[in-house]
Amino acid sequence: MGLLGDELAFARALTAQENESVMALGIRKRYAADAHLLAEGDRSSHVLIVLRGWATVSVSTDRGATRLILGLRGPGELLGEMAALDSHPRSATVRALGPVEAQLIPGDAFRRFLALHPRVSGLVIRQLTFRLRSADQERSALASLTVLQRLASRLAELSGPEPDGPYATSRPGPLHTGTVVHLAQDELAATVGATREAVAKALRLLRAQHIVRTGNRMVEVLDPTLLALLADGHQG
């Protein structure tokens, strides 16, 4: 399972000249925390390149009011490229986690640029392929893994070595260095496609085995090794 989409962020894979040329196509725009950068079902076709900040990518579910978080997108990542390329409505909503700064590029200008720059077009195709594979892995996980396994995998991913990550912060302690994931239980549930109640039950099991410690909008990973084993299906 993978929530962080940066195999190699689009802008970071560009040469200096390519980056300058791409950025010149658009304008810089700032978004407040919780603002929608892109909206599911919208007919707009522009793309965004994240310069600063992090955002969630989510889709509506059969339960109506709930949403499933598909990914986290951070600096250097390209957003909205599918609608720019196929002119279909937006397939997901992108919401700012905190203040976000991005380069907004009109879809027609982006398409013309790709037609003239095959290498950059290849980078977009690579990103689409990577995200498609990640989505397939997520669907497989939803069908085959327990909520405990999915939660353990997600916590392991979010608390891993990601210095620019939106959720994880290092917390030095007297005996170890724990990692804190700053998400509420309903937000964690949205990242693993489970109910809040199921995630609360799984967290109780993890607390009972001293794998995590929880608080207000936080989960501190105390035993990353055992967490990884649970994610792989070992029941301890």
Image: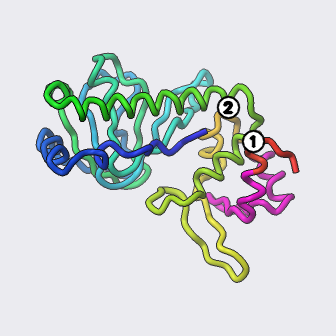
Quadrant, the N terminus: top right
Q: Position of residue 170 (x, y in %)?
A: 57, 69
Q: Residue at x 58, y 32 (%)?
A: 66
Amino acid type at circle 1 is Gln
Provide the secondary structure element on which disc 2 rests. Answer: helix
Q: CA distance from mark 2 to mark 1?
A: 9 Å
Q: Is residue 46 above or below residue 175?
A: above
Magenta span covers which residues?
199-228
Left or right: residue 55 compared with residue 193: left
Q: Residue at x 44, y 43 (%)?
A: 7
Q: Residue at x 22, y 40 (%)?
A: 104
Left or right: residue 21 compared with residue 96: left
Left or right: residue 155 compared with residue 27: right
- Residues marked 2 and 1 touching at CB (< 8 Å): yes
The residue singled out by tag 1 in the image is 149
Q: Is residue 76 above or below residue 207?
A: above
Q: Is residue 131 above or below residue 23?
A: above
The residue singled out by tag 2 in the image is 141
Instruction: Tell which circle, 2 or 1, labels the residue nearer the N-terminal end.
Output: 2
Determine if the magenta segment contains residue 226.
yes
Determine if the magenta segment contains residue 195.
no
Corner quadrant of residue 160: bottom right
Amino acid type at circle 2 is Ala
Q: Which mark is residue 1?
A: none
